[in-house]
Amino acid sequence: MKTSSLIAVAALSVLNLTAAAWAEQSLAADQSEIKFTFKQLGVPVTGHFKTFGADVKLNPKDLAGSSVNVKVDTGSATIGVPETESELAKKPWFDTAQFPQASFSSSSIKAVGDGQYEAQGKLNIKGVSTDVTVPVKLQQTNGATIATGEIPLQRLNFKIGEGEWSDTSMVADEVKVTFKLAINGVDPL
């Protein structure tokens, strides 16, 4: 067999092993959460999304080949008040009829030290897409890799709370989004 053929076979073998390792990665939804906190009339209100998913390809030794894509069902937002939740689905807020999902797709992931990473990519909410850098902390426990982080957003930048709800004395502009994603199948950090 020619040297070039051996190199090609070796390269394909490495790609297949990498693809197989990534194919085994999965989000443990029952151990994961995406929460949001905002202030209404100065009082903190916390809610969460009941339905979301993530396609994760994370290799700590090959961050250039790693990626994360998260999709959130905006209609699954809950703050524990049924009347308010039905309002969240309407046009001034998430407009779930036209924009049923929000998403984040990474373009790069880099290590910044001591288990800390930054995922850069596009955040898309209610048809508005913007570049963001998401700080992420990775820890491994009980066979899972736990990715946690927090990112502040300005809701009005994403047209959330339009019209009369754009008054920030009623509902503050800043919203903190926190997440905990439990990922199975990641190699040791």
Image (spheres, grey):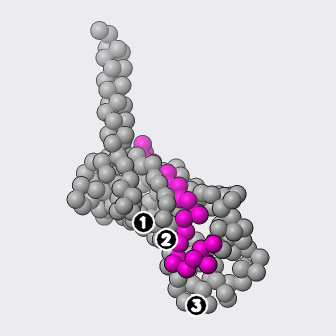
Helix, strand or loop at disc 3? Answer: loop
Q: Earlier in the sequence, mark 3 or mark 2?
A: 3
Q: Quick check: 25 above or below 139?
A: above
Q: Which residue is mark 3?
A: 42
x, y (%) of residue 114?
31, 64
Q: Nearer the viewer, residue 182 or 15?
A: 182
x, y (%) of residue 2?
32, 10
Amino acid at the residue labelled 2 = His
Q: Which residue is mark 2?
A: 48
Whether residue 112 is visible, yes or no, is no
Helix, strand or loop at disc 2? Answer: strand
Helix, strand or loop at disc 1? Answer: strand
Label ID, residue 88: none
- Range of the magenta residues? 64-86
- Where is residue 62, by image quadrant? top left
Amino acid at the residue labelled 1 = Glu
Residue drawn at (39%, 58%) of the image = 29
Q: Are marks 1 and 2 in contact (CB under 8 Å)?
A: yes
Q: Earlier in the sequence, mark 1 or mark 3?
A: 1
- Is 183 part of what is drawn in magenta? no
Using the numbered discs, state the Cα–Cα distance from disc 1 to disc 3 in whole angstroms: 25 Å
Nearer the camera: disc 1 or disc 3: 1
Residue drawn at (31%, 51%) of the image = 184
Q: Which residue is mark 1?
A: 33
Name the image quarter holding the N terminus: top left
Amino acid at the residue labelled 3 = Gly
| Residue at the extreme front of the image, as rendered | 82
x, y (%) of residue 8?
36, 20
Name the image quarter holding the C terminus: bottom left
